[in-house]
Image (cartoon, rainbow, N blue to C red):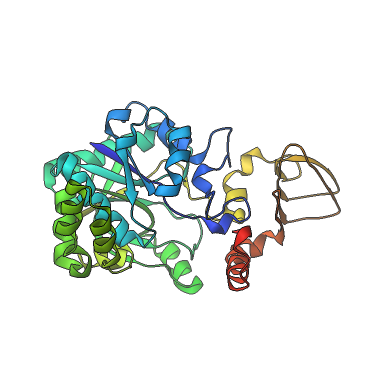
Amino acid sequence: MNYVIMCGGSGTRLWPRSRFTQPKQFAQLVTELTMLEETVKRLDGLATPANTYISTIGPFAPVVHRLLPKVPKDHYIIEPERRDTGPAMAFVAAWMSRVGADEPMILMPADHHIKNPAMYRATFSVGEALVRELGVMVNIGLPPTFPNTNLGYLKVGEELETRGGVHVFAFEGQREKPDAKTAKQFLAEGNYLWNGGYFLWTPQRFMDAYERFAPSIGRQLPAIIDALEKKNEDALHAAFARMEAKSIDYAVIEKMDSSEVRTVRGDFGWADLGDWHMLSEQLAEQADEHGNLVKAHWRGIDTQNTLVYGPPEKLIATIGVSGLVIVDTPDALLVTPKERSQEVKKVVELLTNEGLRQYL
């Protein structure tokens, strides 16, 4: 199986630590390794440089090479431009069809935190076996722990089998990011999993699905492949620009018959680290006795349940505060209550609207 790590996103919900030019997959959020390096490290035993591919954008290629020098540069899948996941994953399928059209591949995010790497690898192996044996697309759903409104959900039916502790379910559809009331309902019903953005199938079957369900994307695939073969950058950009910008979930997944899909439950201690509040919750075991999670040169007096990120050369001091997120960078400082940290995207929108893109 080939491993395609999706590494082109912007991740601005973790602003100001994560930027358009330096997104969270290139940040050291949990350990001394970046999220991308952590992802590759936990694939050890399954993936090698020979079957590892990085999907990213041109400006990030030098960063990828610096972090992953063993992955060949001709394994970089350079997206012509940032669009949505529908065009991005269609482009990956077209690109990978030249490597092995009928060889299973997994498309996986570069910026997730995983607490059980062994189960992570076992889950991928079961997914690969299902693709080979049944020809189905496999998505991996994560057990929800709270009513998250920032993620899509996968509805599952009966449990079909268990392989090596990995549970395989019938797929009964997907729901895009719900409102708070609906998210609470999904959690209570117990037959919904978070959609973590993991997809296993073959490049050819992905392309066939785009042609069936998303012709506004699928009909550009022959031109994409032709442009890749001829190394025609102008034709490549033109064909990619003609693809409708929509998520793969809207474009393909929600239209597929349940018989074409299996959902594997990812019981591997997954966390998206999608915003500062979620990051502080997932790394709670690293907090001090007062609930403070600190990745900075910090001293505090009467400070509780506060997240502090900052550069090692600058001292941050707090007095009499609780439940804050404090993120310091050379050119921007964020201070917000934890419960409002999801609103960081509003700051990004504000800076964009005011033309302050140098801070993004």
The percent position of residue 51, horizontal first and vertical second, equals 27, 33
Q: Relative to 200, is 235 above or below?
A: below
Quadrant where the C terminus is found in the figure: bottom right
Q: Nearer the viewer, residue 266 or 36?
A: 36
* Horizontal arrangement in the rendering, residue 278 relative to residue 297 (left or right): left
The percent position of residue 60, horizontal first and vertical second, equals 45, 45
Residue 155 shows in this picture: no
Q: So how many labels did they put on this image?
A: 0
Residue 195 is drawn in which quadrant?
bottom left
* Horizontal arrangement in the rendering, residue 281 relative to residue 103 (left or right): right
Q: Nearer the viewer, residue 228 or 347?
A: 228
Residue 178 is drawn in which quadrant?
bottom left
Residue 310 shows in this picture: yes
The percent position of residue 172, horizontal first and vertical second, equals 25, 63
Residue at position x 48%, y 66% in the image:
149
Residue at position x 53%, y 48% in the image:
24
Quadrant where the N terminus is found in the figure: top left
* Horizontal arrangement in the rendering, residue 117 relative to residue 128 (left or right): right
The percent position of residue 37, horizontal first and vertical second, equals 47, 35
